[in-house]
Image (cartoon, coloured by chain):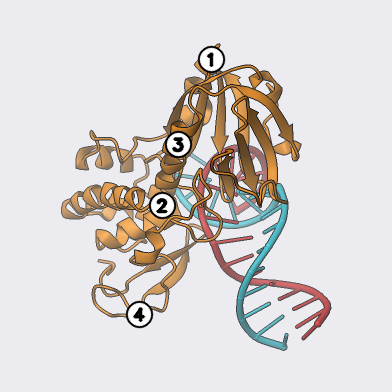
Chain colours: A orange, B cyan, C red
Amino acid sequence: VPELPEVETIRTGLSKHLTNQTVSAFTLLWPNSVTPGLSLDSLIGHTVTSFRRFGKLLVIDFTDDLSLMAHLRMTGQLILSTPTAPIPTLPDRTTRATLSFTSSATLFFNDQRKFGRLTVLPTPEVLLDPFVTSLGPDPTDPSFSTRVLTQALAHHPGLSVKAALLDQHTLAGIGNIYADEALFAARIHPSTPVSALTTPQRRALATAIPAVLNRALSLGGSTSRNYLNALGQRGAYLDTASVYGRAGLPCHSCGTPLAKFALAGRGTSFCPRCQRLR
DNA sequence: CACTTGACCTGTCCGC
DNA sequence: TGCGGACAGGTCAAGT
């Protein structure tokens, strides 16, 4: 599942290999993968200038003020096949769209569950997009702090802290994996109401969130099922995860079997001893 | 208004 | 083996 570290890994990978390349052709195998409006056809003849990320949203900017927004949702992938690093298995049955470049590179948009979306729009409209404008602060930004977290959480005093972290209006880029991981790192029970968080807990969480995200970034993200980076490679974070995907296994810190329950409609893993509700 | 649930989709795994 | 159902979990619309 692509969250902030995964999307950022894709962003840097594509940036390295696709900047200054010009679109020559496209295919659209599942029309609903592109939101109504401008077609992928509009990109033909335009050259990639830059890559941006807003939370889990990736934006590719082209010449002449055109942009492509890509939200991968659950199972989306953006994988680049080039003559020097070909991916012979692509396209496959999950390929929904492709962009070909004059360099002979092809960018494959794969999406098993078809939840992901591509949007072509004028570059100035990216910053006006409702999803973009409603995002909370980016926790990997150097300005992130206990104060920023506290102000962000203040929007949702009635929610559990995990539900608040999953809301992209609170902070941008956290999903189910890193919400659980950060709450363990801060030793906070996921069900703790935002209004009940103590100052030391908020301080611990403000440290834990960027620490977990940056550690995941350094390991190339998490591959639980579908995630692959721009070169088709898996991420290694889950090999050393604290709680996500480890229900029933002993806590790395205290040895207690990790528990799992449904919170905010999502599977939630935690250590019942290290993360006590108080 | 604040919060929860269902829809969107496909694939895998589990119990009967 | 076959088959129904639970589960995986991001976002938005609809429901409570």
SS at circle 3: helix
User: x%, y% of residue A100?
Assistant: 65, 30
C-alpha separation, residue under disc 2 versus residue under disc 3: 12 Å
Q: Provide the residue designation for mark 1.
A: A63
Whether pointer 2 and pointer 3 mark residues with C-beta atoms closer than 8 Å, the reply is no
Q: Tell me the residue at 63%/40% (across/down).
A: A108
Q: Which of marks 4 and 3 is nearer the N terminus?
A: 3
Q: Earlier in the sequence, mark 1 or mark 3?
A: 3
Image vertical order of residue A1 relative to residue A53, above or below: below
Q: Which of marks 4 and 2 is nearer the N terminus?
A: 2
Q: Residue A257 carries which label?
A: 4
C-alpha separation, residue under disc 1 versus residue under disc 4: 54 Å
Dot 1 and dot 4 within a common chain: yes
Work out whether residue A155 can be spotted: yes
Q: Provide the residue designation for mark 2.
A: A221
Please report, as a chain letter, where disc 1 is located. Answer: A
Whether pointer 1 and pointer 3 mark residues with C-beta atoms closer than 8 Å, the reply is no
Q: Tell me the residue at 50%/20% (across/down).
A: A128
Q: Earlier in the sequence, mark 1 or mark 4?
A: 1
C-alpha separation, residue under disc 2 versus residue under disc 1: 30 Å
SS at circle 1: loop
Image vertical order of residue A151 relative to residue A213, above or below: above
Q: Residue A11 carries which label?
A: 3
Q: Which of marks 2 and 3 is nearer the N terminus?
A: 3
